[in-house]
Image (cartoon, helix red, strand yellow):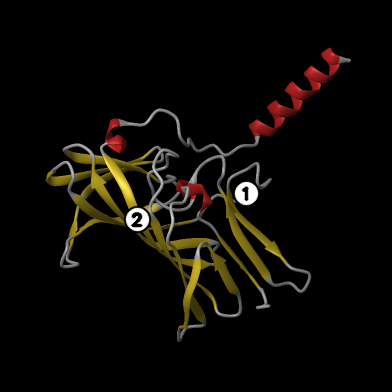
Amino acid sequence: MKIIFTFLFIVLSTQIFAQLGSQDSGGKLSPFQACYDVKFYDLNLTIDLNEKAIAGSVVIRAQAVNDFNKILIDLDSRYTIDAVQSVLNNNREIDLKFTHDSNKVWIDFPTTIKKGEFFSTKIIYAGLPRIAKRPPWDDGIVLAKTKEGKDWVTFTCQSGGADTWWPCKDHPSDEPDSVSLHFTTPSDLILISNGKFISSTENNNGTKTWNWFVSTPINNYGVIFYLGPYKRI
């Protein structure tokens, strides 16, 4: 019986892990990621249910651990990056050179970022996320309907990492101190996210923007939203 049980456990485990996302998450930390420590993320994304797409920008605020002039961040190659910018203290933005290949984004800085220096990098991107076929064992967007036919949407990324839907330093060794979250969605739905609800704004195009804020450290893969016909209680 012990042999049979062990065999069944191995078979089931193999089948489960075969369903995990194809993205790499964690593992050995690249020197081009070890050279900086993320302090803050600012996500500003639009969820387009008609196109099943997401678009927007993410600002990464970080501190240099070592001197460098090149860093690496993670983002699924399904997405197109329109621009990568350095955000200066006066909010002026300067375009940076970058390459996006094999789910990796290599960013070059025109000057050396010194150890201890803070810097902010903005990534503007858009695309069609992979669809999760067997969530949560498979990464991607989860698209469902309620009994009344209303949309219910979220993401699952616990195995493949948050870079399946937003650019980040996809490694469990580096948790941001805080995260600001802004999602623009159809106005007939309610979006719930991490941390504390700050506000919502009705736009003039049939959409609504929801603002949430996380004031404590959080894993990247724990950053999430749930969009649906929720009711306040």
Number of residues whose C-alpha sits closer than 10 Å to that of mark 2, classed few (under 14), some (14–19) or many (20 or more):
many
Q: Is residue 190 above or below residue 30?
A: below
Q: Is residue 93 above or below residue 1?
A: below
**Which residue is found at the position 33% from the left and 31% from the top?**
30
**Which residue is found at the position 54% from the left and 64% from the top?**
193
**Which residue is found at the position 61% from the left and 37% from the top?**
20
Most extreme residue toward the bottom is 204
Q: Is residue 38 above or below residue 46?
A: above
Instruction: From the image, tell me which residue sits under label 1.
Output: 132
Whether pointer 2 and pointer 1 mark residues with C-beta atoms closer than 8 Å, the reply is: no
Q: Position of residue 197 (x, y in %)?
A: 50, 72
Instruction: From the image, tell me which residue sits under label 2.
Output: 40
Residue nearer the viewer, 4 or 118: 118
Foreground: disc 2 or disc 1: 2
165 relative position to 20: left or right: left
Q: What is the quadrant of the C terminus in the image?
A: bottom right
Q: Position of residue 229 (x, y in %)?
A: 66, 74
Most extreme residue toward the front is 216
**Which residue is found at the position 17% from the left and 61% from the top?**
88
Numbered disc 1: secondary structure: loop
Residue nearer the viewer, 87 or 173: 173
Q: Please identify the quarter of the rendering in which residue 36 is found.
A: top left
Q: What is the quadrant of the N terminus in the image?
A: top right
- Residue 50 in sight in this render: no
Q: Position of residue 105 (x, y in %)?
A: 32, 43
- Could you tell me how far apart the alpha carbons at marks 2 and 1 are, in whole angstroms? 28 Å
